[in-house]
Image: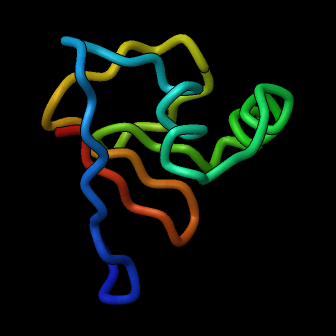
Amino acid sequence: MGADRLVRDVGISDEAIRLGQLLKLAGVVQSGGEVKAVLETGIVRVNGEVETRRGRQLHRGDVIAVERHQLRVV
């Protein structure tokens, strides 16, 4: 994790949330179409691994990195 990237906690009310939903909730993207486009570029990482599935289930403690955004599910 670079010094220019602060981790921002994103709270969820259920046990899990889909990656696409989290990216919209956190304001990283504005629409489902934008989620798809961002995922296709290969710049989204979940717990350090490249992720291209918008339906990927995320749980508390997972860390998502997208360019300058660093998010932690809480």
Q: Which x, y percent locates residue 13?
A: 23, 22
User: In the image, is residue 20 above or below residue 73?
Assistant: above
Q: Which residue is drawn at 81% across and 38% down?
A: 34
Q: In terms of depth relative to the viewer, which is nearer, 3 or 17?
A: 17
Q: Quadrant of residue 16?
A: top left
Residue at image coords 61%, 53%:
28
Residues 41 and 38: in front is 38
Whole-percent x, y for residue 56 in the image: 46, 15
Which quadrant is the N terminus positioned in? bottom left
Asked where in the image residue 4 lies, by quadrant, the reply is: bottom left
> On the rendered structure, is 59 left or right of 42?
left
Q: Where is residue 8 in the image (x, y as percent from the top left)?
A: 30, 62
- Residue 67 appears left or right of 22: right
Reply above or below: 22 against 26: above
Look at the image and tell me in which quarter the C terminus lies.
Answer: top left
Residue sitting at x 77%, y 26%: 32
Q: Which residue is drawn at 31% across and 76% down?
A: 6
Question: Residue 30, image x and y in percent?
Answer: 75, 44
Left or right placement of residue 34 versus residue 2 in this view = right
Q: Classify 43 as above or below 24.
A: below
